[in-house]
Image (cartoon, rainbow, N blue to C red):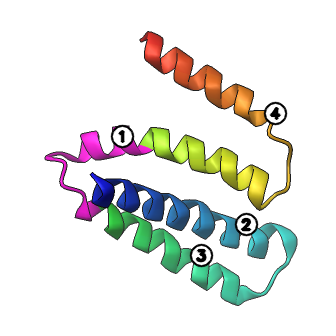
C-alpha cells in the first residue's frame, strides 16, 4: 500500500513539475534547459505509472485522478504561494465524487 501511494505521489510531482517547468520556459521566458527538464519529467511520469500493481490502465488513471487534484491544490499553495481557498474547491470535488 505504501509503495502504491509513493508511486502516485512521485508520478504526480513529475507531471505537475514537468508541466510547470515547460510553462516557465514558454510563458515566462525562463531558460531553455527548463523546457528540457520539464519534458524529461513528463516522460518519467508516463513511465512511473507502469510500476503500479493495478491490473489495468484505466484503474491506475482513475485512482491517480484524485491524487492529482490534491497535489495540484498543494502545488498552487506551496509553489505559486496562493491562498488555500482552493481547498474549498477540492472538498467540493471529492464530495461530488463521493455522491456519485
Q: Is residue 34 above or below residue 41?
A: below
Q: In front here: 37 or 63?
A: 63
Badge 2 density bin: few <14, some 14–19, many ≥20, Cα 10 Å: some
Identified at 36% across, 40% down, the residue is 63
Badge 4 density bin: few <14, some 14–19, many ≥20, Cα 10 Å: few
Dot placed on the residue nearer the N-terminal end, 1 or 3: 3
Disc 2 + disc 3, Cβ < 8 Å: yes
Badge 1 density bin: few <14, some 14–19, many ≥20, Cα 10 Å: few
Please give the residue where the numbered disc 1 appears in the rendered image: 63
Please give the residue where the numbered disc 3 appears in the rendered image: 38
The disc placed on residue 25 is none
Q: CA distance from mark 3 to mark 4?
A: 28 Å
| Residue 93, position as x, y percentages in the image | 58, 24
| Residue 90, position as x, y percentages in the image | 64, 31
Q: CA distance from mark 2 to mark 3?
A: 9 Å
| Residue 39, position as x, y percentages in the image | 54, 76
Given this view, does label 4 or label 2 mark the residue nearer the observer?
Answer: 4
Part of the protein shown in magenta: 50-64
Pick the quarter of the image with the C terminus: top left
Please give the residue where the numbered disc 2 appears in the rendered image: 23
Dot placed on the residue nearer the N-terminal end, 3 or 4: 3
Q: CA distance from mark 1 to mark 3?
A: 24 Å
Asked whether, in this view, residue 48 is left or right of residue 18, the answer is left
Identified at 73% across, 26% down, the residue is 88
Amino acid at each position: 500500500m505504501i509503495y502504491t501511494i509513493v508511486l502516485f505521489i512521485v508520478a504526480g510531482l513529475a507531471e505537475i513539475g514537468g508541466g510547470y517547468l515547460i510553462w516557465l520556459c514558454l510563458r515566462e521566458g525562463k531558460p531553455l534547459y527548463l523546457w528540457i527538464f520539464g519534458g524529461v519529467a513528463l516522460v518519467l511520469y508516463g513511465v512511473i505509472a507502469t510500476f503500479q500493481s493495478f491490473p489495468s490502465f484505466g484503474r491506475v488513471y482513475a485512482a491517480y485522478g484524485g491524487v492529482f487534484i490534491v497535489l495540484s491544490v498543494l502545488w498552487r499553495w506551496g509553489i505559486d504561494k496562493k491562498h488555500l481557498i482552493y481547498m474549498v474547491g477540492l472538498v467540493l470535488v471529492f464530495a461530488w465524487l463521493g455522491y456519485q
